[in-house]
Image (cartoon, rainbow, N blue to C red):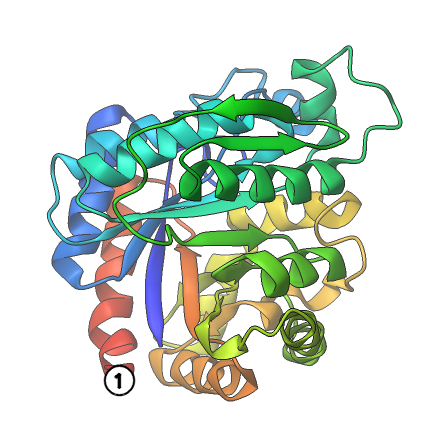
Amino acid sequence: MLFSVALPTCVEGLIYPVPYVTPEKLIEVGVAAERLGYHSVWGNDHLHTQNYVWDEWHAVPNYYEPLISLAALAGHTKQIKLGTSVIVMPMREPSLLAKQAATLDQLSGGRLLLGIGVGAYREEFEAVRPRAPRSTNRGEMVDEGIRAIQELFTKETASFTGRYYAFEGVKMGPKPKQNPLPIYSGGNSDAGAVRAGRYAQGWLPAVLPIDVLKRKIGILRDAAAAVSRSIAGIDIAPQMSVSLGKTSEEALRRFRDSQVYQHMLSLKRSTLKDLDLTQVERMNLVGTPAQVTDQIAAYRDAGVTHCCALIFPANTIEETVDQMDWFARDVMRRFH
């Protein structure tokens, strides 16, 4: 079982207060994650302040671009993997994204994990792409984007023609240091699981109950088998929050009082629209270290290989790092 941490690139107002992070503190979290033995850190991606964030905080949060943030962190670390959870493909152009990713993979010594997804907030897509037709299917854009990027990564001369993206005869170098560079398909939808099974090296859902997760892993397995792939090579990497306490009541209170909890409720309109969120803590890792250990074991038995981009409810970077330390000492070590 792998364990990784959410790097706070675009989190102010969403899962943490405004203000929460500075460039120096961003690097501090990544350095701490490497010191504590986490497998990787994962930065999320936003270009625009969401309506509900503006309504709550009346301030523009600091959203640090994830690839540039990971490049900065690469210079302060040596081994920890550097992931995106996720790059919002509908707001990106595949040729430029492929160039950025390949460059980062080379400069970091082959440490990039490229998570790609739809993005939780359509309002953000409409703000930065106002001329896009209302009929634009962002899921199709992700599907095309992943395939297009893989062409650029693997072909000396790459061409691609789709509904949303196209290029012709692109000769791009350098290629990524890793072959293949791991691409993760983000999203809770069945389509996201199918996409992971067909094309990707990993699947990045978020906050799914174990029974739903099992069903979607089955969808992923069937999609992989249809193209003669084995699920054994695909990292099943759901993102969850971790709230530890000396008692289960303390852990639950910390979780329910956090901005993370409010953020998950906001996703009822998008990423988590098909789930009952009245007991959302049951979809996360909330409890004493022993209880959380048992929860992770249940996810492992369901087919999870990676507790990915873990979010620790806190109000400051110092509190976040303290929670990361506690989890590493009293939970993570039990799985090594």
With 134 as the anchor, is 304 left or right in this view? Answer: left
- Label 1 residue SS: helix
Looking at the picture, how far across and down is residue 13, in whole percent?
52, 31
With 125 as the anchor, is 203 left or right in this view? Answer: left
Q: Is residue 235 above or below residue 154?
A: below
Q: Is residue 168 above or below residue 209?
A: above
Give neighbour class at mark 1: few <14, some 14-19, many 20+ (Cα, 10 Å): few
Looking at the picture, how far across and down is residue 104, in whole percent?
28, 34
Q: Quadrant of residue 207?
A: bottom right
| Residue that badge 1 annotates | 334
Looking at the picture, how far across and down is residue 69, in whole percent?
30, 30
Query: Most extreme residue toward the right, as rendered?
Result: 135
Q: Residue at x 52, y 24 (%)?
A: 169
Assign the C terminus to one quadrant of the image: bottom left
Q: Is residue 195 above or below residue 146?
A: below
Foreground residue among 335 and 186: 186
Amino acid carrying label 1: it is: Arg
Looking at the picture, how far across and down is residue 140, in whole percent?
74, 40
Q: Residue at x 24, y 62 (%)?
A: 38
Q: Quadrant of residue 28?
A: top left
